[in-house]
């Protein structure tokens, strides 16, 4: 797991170099025949990448996006109209049975289909009309890391193809920001010891980093056996905050930008409740560095001098400290993150 976390800058660079030209070609096609709406189908970590894709695409293009519920097709055999839709299947292995079933039914109903996978010879890649390949190399760890960030990058490329004002030059900096995030590993390894006996936690994110809250919680559940809930800051204040007591572990993604005021408000509330909070941010969020007691700050400023903060590019560099934390926390607990109990790399469900 740690080896593959460290491989992410090069995996992202390979993916971008190879798949950006594909996105350019797809962009020309979609300009001529834009979809009326988009459906994203995925499971597990890939479903978290799909959640990011929903926020990204709707924010940057205005095209409505739905997350598929495969059981509607696989269990209830419902007939869903997908005419004029773009249906995207996201699968690390390309062999997720229910995700591929959604793809198959979408093709039969006349939808344009896209596959996002790490395996070029997979069922997903062979079935989809268009394919974006995550060039991460073979992922051996059961806990997906480099394929998750590769899928996030693929979501940027898909949004770009749909006409989003995403700058390729900014995407080309993501491997650099990922490399900077990896420099935090000694600090994170040292912090992990503080949480050795943690058996429950809550992770909070909002907007473009909401998916990272799901992914961080998933990594702690599958590698550290921590019961980790995940919420948006808005939802958490609507009831779940009642369970917070002194020393309750809370992890917050806190980019500068439009989501920061609500995260800051929540952070202040948690501090008053004496919760154990750890904030993931970057060096450009000066307010977070001042307000939060415990901070992991990616050592780059994700905004250029004199420009508005570009929150849109924070999710990949922000999830890397969380991945490192989960791997090192597992080690602190005497667990092997590469051999989580009862799990296997490819899960097939219908």
Image (cartoon, helix red, strand yellow):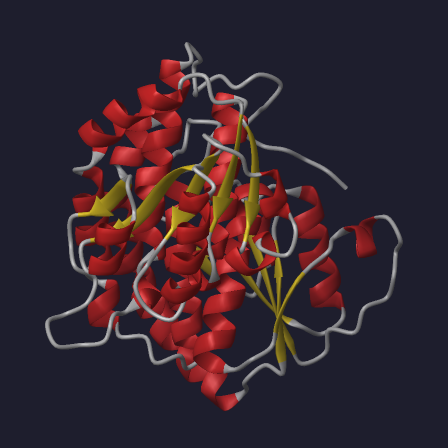
Relative to 107, 320 lies left or right: left
Residue that lies at the very extreme toward the top in this rendered image = 334
Identify which residue, 266 or 58, lies in the foreground.
Answer: 266
In x, y percent, where is residue 170?
22, 68
Q: Nearer the viewer, residue 42 or 96?
A: 42
Relative to 30, say whether 113 is above or below. Answer: above
* 179 or 271, nearer to the observer: 271
- Name the residue at 37% across, 36% down: 323
Q: Residue furthest left?
A: 305
- The residue located at (46%, 87%) in the rendering is 31
Q: Residue 128: horizontal and vertical position, in percent? A: 58, 60
In the image, 111 versus 4, the foreground residue is 4
Is residue 170 positioned above or below 252 on the image?
below
* Quarter-of-image position of residue 38: bottom right
Q: Is residue 101 left or right of residue 283?
A: right
Quarter of the N terminus within the rendering: top left
- How many numbered callouts? 0
Where residue 266 sits in the image (x, y, percent)? 45, 54
Question: Split into 4 quadrants, where in the image is the C terminus?
Answer: top right
Q: Is residue 180 visible?
A: yes
Residue 76 image offset from top left, x and y in percent: 89, 53
């Amino acid at each position: 797991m740690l080896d593959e976390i460290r491989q992410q800058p090069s995996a992202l660079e390979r993916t971008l170099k190879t798949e950006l030209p594909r996105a350019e070609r797809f962009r020309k096609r979609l300009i001529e025949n834009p979809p009326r709406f988009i459906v994203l189908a995925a499971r597990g970590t890939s479903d978290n990448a799909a959640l990011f894709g929903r926020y990204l695409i709707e924010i940057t293009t205005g095209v409505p996006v739905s997350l598929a519920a495969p059981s509607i097709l696989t269990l209830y055999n419902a007939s869903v109209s997908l005419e004029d839709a773009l249906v995207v299947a996201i699968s690390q292995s390309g062999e997720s049975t229910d995700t591929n079933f959604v793809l198959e039914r979408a093709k039969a109903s006349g939808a344009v289909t896209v596959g996002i996978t790490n395996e070029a010879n997979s069922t997903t890649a062979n079935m989809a009309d268009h394919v974006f390949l995550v060039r991460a190399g073979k992922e051996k760890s059961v806990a997906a890391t480099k394929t998750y960030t590769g899928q996030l990058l693929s979501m940027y490329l898909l949004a770009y193809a749909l006409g989003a004002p995403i700058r390729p030059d900014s995407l080309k900096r993501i491997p650099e920001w990922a490399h900077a995030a990896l420099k935090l590993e000694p600090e994170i390894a040292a912090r992990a010891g503080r949480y050795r006996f943690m058996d429950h936690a809550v992770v909070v994110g909002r907007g473009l980093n909401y998916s990272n809250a799901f992914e961080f919680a998933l990594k702690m559940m599958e590698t550290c056996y921590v019961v980790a809930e995940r919420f948006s800051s808005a939802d958490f204040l609507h009831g779940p905050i009642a369970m917070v007591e002194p020393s309750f572990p809370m992890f917050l993604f806190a980019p500068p930008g439009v989501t920061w005021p609500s995260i800051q408000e929540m952070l202040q509330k948690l501090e008053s409740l004496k919760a154990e909070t750890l904030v993931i941010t970057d060096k450009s969020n000066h307010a977070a560095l001042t307000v939060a007691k415990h901070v992991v700050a990616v050592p780059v400023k994700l905004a250029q001098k004199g420009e508005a903060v570009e929150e849109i590019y924070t999710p990949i560099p922000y999830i890397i400290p969380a991945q490192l934390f989960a791997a090192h926390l597992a080690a602190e607990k005497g667990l092997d993150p590469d051999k989580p109990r009862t799990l296997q790399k490819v899960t097939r469900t219908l």
